[in-house]
Amino acid sequence: MNAFSSRLVFNVVGVSLLIVSVLVVPFTAHCQTPPTQNLAGGGVAAPTGPTFRVVRSSSGTKGVERGGRFIIEDPRAQFNAGQDRKVIVYFEWEGPVGPHKFEALWRNPSGKVVVVTDFEFDPHKSPYSGYWTMLLDENAPIGFWAVDARIDGESAGTYPFEVIAGPLTTPVPHVRIPPNAGEIYHQTEAATVFVEKLDASGKSIDRASGFFIGSDRVITTFGVIDGASGLRVMLAGGKQIATNLVVSWNRWQDWAVLAVDAPGVPVLKSASDKVGEVGDHCYSLGISPAGTRIISQTTVVGDSNQPPAGHRLSLSVAFDRVAAGGPVLNEFGDVIGLLGGSLLPGTNSASSKGGFPPLAGSTVAMTPAFAVPIGLVKIPSSNTDSMTSLASLAATGQFIPPLQGQDQVGFGSLALGLDKKNGTGWPRDPKDEFSHSDGQIILFISWNPKTKFKGIAVARFYNLDNHEVTESRPVNINIRPDSLPITYWPVQLADFPPGVYRADVYLGESPVWREFFRILP
């Protein structure tokens, strides 16, 4: 919500009227240093003190509010005293929230302060911004003017501009005015889809989001196609389209492009310039408790590049897993990335849904809101010869097989040992991170079967490229619904180089339990 603190009127020599306004922008920016601006784009912001930092400043003759921000529509730092009727000078600051006193000192070409305007305001979010308007007439002094901004008596930036008598010597650049959040929501929602993962019987076993980025091309997260026998794409209008063709993919970067025959469906546009800078304000589509799309305003708060996962943007937003694969948009509604961006392929299929430690750093479980930059996604032409079927991806080891028969397992864990004090045994010190100095750990399964099974149980271990590292000894088991047996296997850590691994427990030919774990040197 924008709040305008005051409107003050003054009469000064050569200046007809001075008006001051302040507005609060409802987002949080992260800026290391104030950007330098050339005169054509709106002057140069002077260095500020340590408390208040200029995020941006500009000037022009007209502006508009969009999304809680004031946009100068004709940014320039040169004005004609006989033709231009006003000068708008805009500042945006990063600093502490709370009540502040804002002042503007207007200096004429001789350096004299011709008027001082001030107001008090209590912004609740940072950054906050304000603009002042000076009305010109033909008698305005010619030369370089300056606006000195102060907050609580502390220097908060200086903005120079020039008043001339003849034609402008610098061109007025074209400015793209961003649409409001409602307009972005409607155009994005129409191009966004749900993607359902289907098993061999046609049953839906997972769900995520995606969006049309071109004719018959849907971008989604690789996680939702991983292990799929088929896919069902649900358009915004309710129409459902089946597909099993993938145009391009990258399991480590966590994206896939599907072939979806849906002529006439609206498509989103990729941002053409560099995107995803820390501090950039953007939008994402989430999921409401009722299952409908909702738009959220967010900010890029981090930028990482962890091999082999690659580039990721961190966002100041939490989202439901079903929103993964949906678009992240800049202030113009252009796509800068897609939600999701898991750092570890396949972790969404783990039996426990607790967080898994990131690839590097702390062992504290974290679930950051990552996005994959749209520049990483490769979208080939419509040539059908370049398409790959889901079955081919599975056959070449790109997929992790989906879990089946999870209802046979009551509890499973990796642990440092087995505590047999209660007679039957229970895992001692269960965890998902171990060291070679531990020597040996156990994989423990407590069965709680819903149906009878008699046959072989085995544990298989894979690296994150889906290559099998080792396999446990097979165990003959005979489980039935009225029993709660346990099975455990010793695991020698010497078989595992340092890294992250996947443990799958199979009953016969079906994986029924899965967990990821890390081995430290």
Image: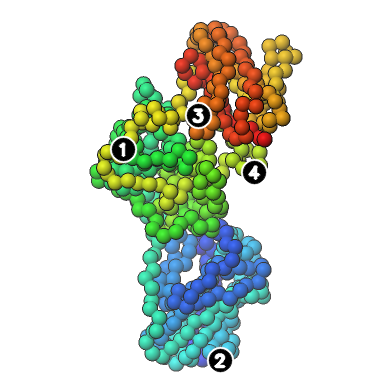
> 20 and 386: which one is in front?
386
Label ID, residue 254: none
Q: Earlier in the sequence, mark 2 or mark 3?
A: 2
Looking at the rendering, which quadrant does residue 153 occupy?
A: bottom right
The three-letter amino acid code for the residue at tag 4 is Gly
Residue 246, horizontal then vertical, whole percent: 34, 37
The three-letter amino acid code for the residue at tag 3 is His
Residue at the spot of label 3: 467
The three-letter amino acid code for the residue at tag 2 is Ser
Label ID, residue 387: 1
Q: Is residue 442 above or below residue 215?
A: above
Q: Earlier in the sequence, mark 2 or mark 4?
A: 2
Q: Earlier in the sequence, mark 4 or mark 3?
A: 4
Q: Gap between marks 2 and 4, in whole Å?
A: 57 Å
Q: Residue furthest left?
A: 263
Identified at 58% across, 89% down, the residue is 111
Residue at the spot of label 2: 110
State left or right for residue 419 relative to residue 150.
Answer: right
Please state which of the two labelled residues, at mark 3 or mark 1, is closer to the viewer.
3
Q: Earlier in the sequence, mark 3 or mark 1?
A: 1
Q: Gap between marks 4 and 3, in whole Å?
A: 25 Å
Disc 2 element:
loop
State left or right for residue 326 relative to residue 355.
Answer: left
Disc 4 element:
loop
Residue 56, visible in the rendered structure: yes
Q: Are marks 2 and 3 in contact (CB under 8 Å)?
A: no
Residue 234, visible in the rendered structure: no
